Amino acid sequence: MNGTGTMDATPAGGAAMDGGYLLEVENVRKEFPGVVALDNVQLRLKRGSVHALMGENGAGKSTLMKIVAGIYTPDSGSFKLRGEDIKLRGPLDALEHGIAMIHQELNLMAPMTVAENIWIRREPLTRFGFVDHGEMRRKTAELFKRLNIDIDPDVQVGTLTVASRQMVEIAKAVSYESDVLIMDEPTSALTEREVDHLFTIIRALRGQGKGIIYITHKMNELFEIADEFSVFRDGKYIATKLSHEVTRDDIIRMMVGREITQMFPKEEVPIGAVVLSAKGLTLKGVFSDVSFDVRSGEILGIAGLVGSGRSNIAETVFGVTPADAGTIELFGKTVRIDSPSTAMRHGMAFLTEDRKETGCFLLLDIQENTQMAVLQSGYVKNGFVKQKHLSRDSVEISQALRVKTPDMAEPIINLSGGNQQKVLIARWLLTKPKILILDEPTRGIDVGAKAEIHRLISKLAGQGVAVIMISSEMPEVLGMSDRIMVVHEGRVTGFLDRAEASQVKIMELASH
Amino acid sequence: MSTNEIAGSANVIGSKKRLPPEVSILGVLIGIAIVFEILGWIFVGDSFLANKQRLSIIILQVSVIGIIAVGVTQVIITAGVDLSSGSIVGLSAMVAASLAQTSANPRAVYPTLTDISPIWAILAGLGVGLLAGIVNGSLIARTKIPPFIATLGMMVSARGLAKWYTLGQPVALLDDSFTWFGKSFNIFGFPLPLPVIVFLLVAVICHIALTYTRYGKFTYAIGANPQAARVSGINIGGHLIKVYAVAGLLSGLAGVMTAARAASGQPGMGVAYELDAIAAAVIGGTSLSGGVGRITGTVIGTIILGVLTSGFTFLKVGAYYQEIIKGIIIVSAVIIDQHRQNKRKKA
Ligand SMILES: Nc1ncnc2c1ncn2[C@@H]1O[C@H](COP(=O)(O)OP(=O)(O)OP(=O)(O)O)[C@@H](O)[C@H]1O
Ligand SMILES: [Mg+2]
């Protein structure tokens, strides 16, 4: 371990003084059927630095990282680690060479405990070859203490929030003590507080001379944590720059190849009658006495820290976990919403937070994924699916959302994370909802498409749809909402109007 | 802006031609048939394939298993399993036979219900299967016990019921109008048994249902990701009951066919059929972890099983060896198929 203090203070660039790069990738090419995911790209990672990868959805960032982590074999290209040529035979091989990766999608085993997940394949054993659970717990506690993470090592991962799971993934990756640590959109499910926490961890690792590759779509993070960054566009390498040399607009231009005018194109629309009214909703042990109204044309933002119950409230409103107490009124009538299908019958739609667990049908193709929800209510005659009609409308909506794929018959698992997210949004838009609940709608979506989706949400509100939007991204909540409901530890702590809302006010309500 | 975005019109869909997954398993079938043909000329001095009689027997043998396998495939696509098919065949055969006896039988099960229209026997056989299927499905949907356990219970109980029904006695002397359903017809000089036609009909209907109807889409969705299916508004419990009911109904149909062909009902009918049916589905590319599978594959898988049995008999391989080799071939076929699929996925 190097002296943390001095390394930490070293700005970008200077860190590579000890000569050479930690990791050098040259001329990497990777083709998938119908797509050139990477076209002779390069990447050089310095010791003790954070290197961000930027690019639109489907630009090839995750693919490149999977190659570095030994998951894909490139079609061609060279690969140097600590100055030596190497060829990785698989993810295990990569780990042994000191390369660990946090994937874009969570990869934990829900029925196993936090400790079991972290030490899988490396479980401490007793003399007799049994797993030493005590030792495992101790090591986990130690790791968590070092990283300042407050999660019980013995709880089942399945019971944790998405954000806590993400922290477990981070701890697991750190526990490999590897030299190269790849993080593929680690903050897409985190709120500011955890993001700060993660950055503290990253800075400490950088201080120890490790190289961190950091993929993100969030510009502010780039300036906050990255020393340098590389931009990719449509599978091609564009440039590598120091992050303090450029502006936000420079990067966007490099990424997109065009200007993006307005980030939060919120339109002023007339707000109508109350469409959904929740009164005293309670889910034992999770949240209690939650009351709010949403009007037609209104965008109600829900803000709060991770674990505050934001997503749980949305799940209850949609009938995923029916309420223990309280009522929901839709269009003035009290309705008992006991399942998602009931909610959908009343015109609700719900984009969930975790696209792998509750969103995608990973085995099915894009078309099937797009159409699955609308089949409840339309495009079916005598039990038969009106496929032609449905396919045409699906393609139309996918184009509007700029889903990047050669073919609707492509399995959705082959899409980049951001493009999967767009397919899920398309799935719900196809149902023409009257009440649209969005949980982290732009999770993993690039700047260009994000503006597109915001425009779409605005347009829907303009057509009289009532929108409930949960987001961990302050600018998104502030930019899009007419009103913001702040939740703290399962209770509503206040409402803020668009005019009075500010980051500071939200944080006050979210954490007192 | 990118050339990769979906092109401007709907006709892009399906533009990229892919080989259907059945092609590889069809290759396995053809390979096995050729091997038997060659071995036939070497060891028996006769052709394996150029024998109408034998081909007719193969397809007859496979048709009963095939009818069951078509139902089981749907169950497996939902990430479930049905172990009760064989026992339902036995029970439904007994019940159907008991309503198809002639008055010539002095010890008919229902002396007052002899010489009646075969419709009643058929409906009763189907009804028994449907009911058993609904019980399976409801148990799974309502109590959330694993399908393996629910259908294991049904497997044991239905077999018991089949034996209890006549206290273990076979039901004999069935009416010709009923046994007609197990007969063969000459079509273009080829003896085609009626069960085969029923099998093909069932396969076509279920293929269409799985591919083009909402029922089919939901079946795949539940197997692919039950949580996402629920959030998409699919009533999982209700749908599972339908799927298990279909599987039960088809087992009942297989039971009726079996009784008609054998011109009797015996409590031991259909023992271990569920295993052949599951094997046929899996050989045909249906994934036991759910979300993947097609009826066309299952049909080919069923035929592979039939060809194996018939080929071994043709080569006069001893019964013990037959079973040993059959087991090995089933596993190998699945390994080869999965390997190929994985390769394609990784590209
Ligand atoms: N296994 C695969 N099979 C086929 N195509 C793939 C596969 N994996 C990725 N692709 C394609 O390669 C391209 C690059 O995908 P990649 O996941 O690297 O994008 P990304 O830059 O990480 O995007 P995002 O920001 O959305 O996560 C995309 O067009 C994607 O559809
Ligand atoms: Mg990605």
Image: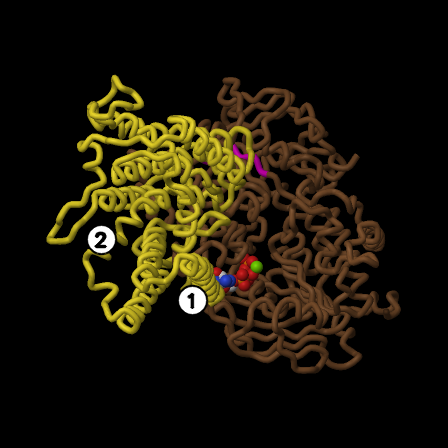
Chain colours: A brown, B yellow
Query: Which kind of residue does numbered mark 1 sit on?
Result: Pro
Is residue A260 something that shows in the picture? yes
Left or right: residue B280 versus residue A486 is left
Does B11 appear above or below B94? below
Is mark 2 in CB contact (under 8 Å) with mark 1? no
**Nearer-the-camera pick, A70 or A427:** A70
Viewed as shown, does residue B29 lie left or right of A251? Answer: left
Q: How many marks?
A: 2
Task: State which chain disc 1 sits on.
Answer: A
> In percent of the image, x 23 and y 67: which residue is there?
B47
Q: Chain of mark 2?
A: B
Measured from the top left, where is residue A409 in percent x and y? 39, 55
Which range of residues does the magenta coloring cover? A462-469
Q: Amino acid at mark 2?
A: Ser
* Magenta-span inclusion, residue A464: yes
The label number, if any, that marks residue A33 in the structure image: 1
Judged from the image, the secondary structure of the residue bearing numbered disc 1 is: loop
Tell me if residue A223 comes above or below residue A342 in the rendering. Answer: below
* Disc number lying in front (2 or 1): 2
Asked whether A382 falls inside the magenta stretch, the response is no
Report x, y in % for residue B228. 52, 42
Pointer 1 residue Cβ closer than 8 Å to ligand 1: yes
SS type, badge 2: helix
